[in-house]
Amino acid sequence: MIDNDTRVGRMDRTAEGGRDALLLAARVLLGAIFVQSGFGKLMALGGFIAGLESQGVPMAAVAGTVGAVVECFGGLAVVLGAWTRLAALLVAGFTVAATLVAHRYWDAAPEAMKMQQIQFMKNLAIIGGYLALVASGAGRFSVDGFRSPRR
């Protein structure tokens, strides 16, 4: 009979053995949506900035430009695993700001409140994923991994 400690130990060893592949999957899954969304914002920057202005964002032109660049290129850096800790921290910061601007469910009309709350909570989960990348780094299957000396 296998006890719980044995199962946990086996799971830990399995996860550790697949660490680099799991980090690659995490980076691609977290970063891809930001590359796509950020690229779309860069291609229609005027509309994105106008939307920020309509939401009362101060210095919307600067915030919109910086935000779109961080979203697109930060997401790309995460996917590639290049300057991963910095990129993940920047994208997490962008996501905090975007969440506080676009998903204030407590201010939403009653018919939109639940959906905005779901979007708010989804973004908190994404922020958690990025903070985990800040803590763990990119793993071996990354630009950072190829640049670092082999252990």
Image (cartoon, rainbow, N blue to C red):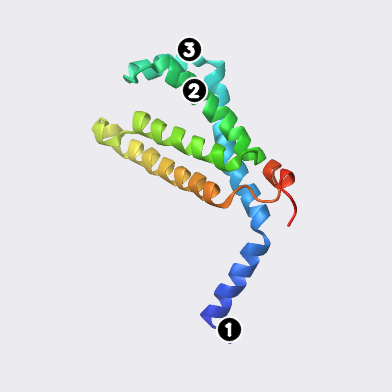
Residue plotted at (55% across, 38% down): 86
Secondary structure at numbered mark 1: loop
Q: Quadrant of the N terminus?
A: bottom right
1 vs 2, front mark: 2
x then y, percent, for residue 8:
55, 73
Do the CB atoms of the residues marked 1 and 2 lie less than 8 Å apart? no
Residue 37 appearing in the image: no
Q: Which residue is mark 3?
A: 46
Other-residue count near label 2 (Cα within 10 Å), few / some / many at <14 / 14–19 / ≥20: few
Q: Which mark is residue 2?
A: 1
x then y, percent, for residue 143:
70, 41
Q: Is residue 64 left or right of residue 16?
A: left
Secondary structure at numbered mark 2: helix
Residue plotted at (74% across, 45% down): 146
Q: Nearer the viewer, residue 9 or 93?
A: 93
**Which quadrant of the figure has residue 85?**
top right
Give the Cα distance between marks 1 and 3. 61 Å
**Which quadrant of the figure has residue 106?**
top left
Q: Which mark is residue 66?
A: 2
Q: Is residue 150 left or right of residue 136?
A: right
Do the CB atoms of the residues marked 1 and 3 lie less than 8 Å apart? no
Do the CB atoms of the residues marked 3 and 2 lie less than 8 Å apart? no
Residue plotted at (53% across, 40% down): 88
- Looking at the image, how many numbered discs can be counted on the residues? 3
Q: Nearer the viewer, residue 71 or 134?
A: 134
Q: Does label 1 or label 2 sit earlier along the sequence?
A: 1
Secondary structure at numbered mark 3: helix
